[in-house]
Image (cartoon, rainbow, N blue to C red):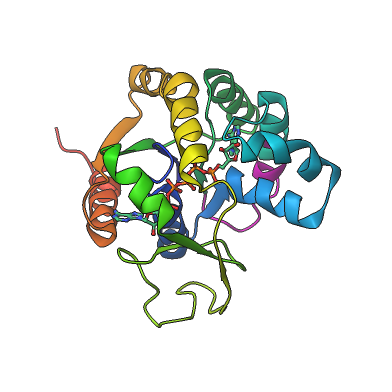
Amino acid sequence: MNLILLGPPGAGKGTQAKRLEDRHGLEQLATGDMLRAERESGSELGRRVQAVMDAGRLVSDEIMIALIAQRIDRLGDAKGFVLDGFPRTVPQAEALDAMLAQRGLKLDFVIEITVDEAALIDRISGRFTCSSCGASYHERYNRPKVEGACDFCGAAQFVHRADDRPETVRARLAAYHAQTAPILPYYRARGLLRAVDGMAAPDQVTRAIEALLAQSAAPSHG
Ligand code: AP5
């Protein structure tokens, strides 16, 4: 099963992608996490993208398409992938279609997580992430099940993201509306787009996504 999660910064893409990875044996391909890992490692790519990310702007299509193509070629034993943060522009969506077709793969669903914009700054300012596996938590809405330990990998260190300051979040939201929202009609026209209410609690959003996947897996009659 190959999925894309779409939605503005703070919609809950990373939170739900991690759960899909865990429950369905999919590989989470989170481009933001990949770029942050490049920055941490001090690679040339990491240095090149640093200023763009810190300003809340999008990294170039050329870099992102090359990065994701490499990762799709290294899927190994995963039962598919869940893309979180890619594609983010129409050229990225077109390039993804071409790279999947070349590899004999297809997309099953594109799931839009819809949210009220007013909630996003609050969500993002309360976020902390696992420094080992990148899982997202929130000070009030989504704490680890065992205090101080990541639900997914057990690590005990958590960090705040450099681009989560309110002024950068506003720039990221502007980039979402200008450059990413136009890919919704692209996938709607292909019959792949589904929406879930991202304003519900995280567990309810998970249930809504699971219901959608179960529906599609059920044999059709008539
Ligand atoms: P990226 O890391 O992808 O950030 P983003 O898309 O802005 O999304 P976020 O990670 O902020 O939000 P999310 O939807 O994953 O929410 P989360 O689950 O964490 O990208 C960062 C940067 O990298 C970009 O700005 C760009 O520069 C660059 N980049 C990356 N990909 C690129 C690409 N393809 N092209 C070009 N540039 C690219 O949840 C948020 C918070 O809310 C958490 O605290 C969580 O615990 C909480 N929460 C989650 N769900 C709920 C809920 N239902 N109710 C209450 N709280 C909730």
What residue do we see at 58% from left, 18% from top?
91
Q: Residue furthest right?
A: 44
In the image, residue 186 lies at what x, y percent? 41, 18
Residue interval drawn in magenta: 69-80
Q: Considering depth in this image, is 141 or 171 the residue closer to the camera?
A: 171
Establish if 190 lies above or below 24.
Answer: above
| Magenta stretch, main secondary structure class | loop
What residue do we see at 53% from left, 52% from top?
28
Establish if 119 lies above or below 62.
Answer: below
* Side of 145 where 174 appears, left or right: right
Q: Considering depth in this image, is 127 or 38 the residue closer to the camera?
A: 127
Establish if 158 lies above or below 18.
Answer: below
In the image, residue 114 lies at what x, y percent? 28, 38
Label total for image: 0
What residue do we see at 49% from left, 80% from top?
149
Quadrant position of residue 202:
bottom left
Q: Is residue 115 visible?
A: no
Q: Is residue 61 visible?
A: yes
Quadrant position of residue 191:
top left
In the image, residue 119 lies at what x, y percent? 29, 45
Q: Considering depth in this image, is 110 or 174 the residue closer to the camera?
A: 174
Q: Is residue 139 magenta?
A: no
Q: Residue furthest left?
A: 222
Q: Report the quarter where the C terminus lies.
A: top left
In the image, residue 217 lies at what x, y percent? 29, 47
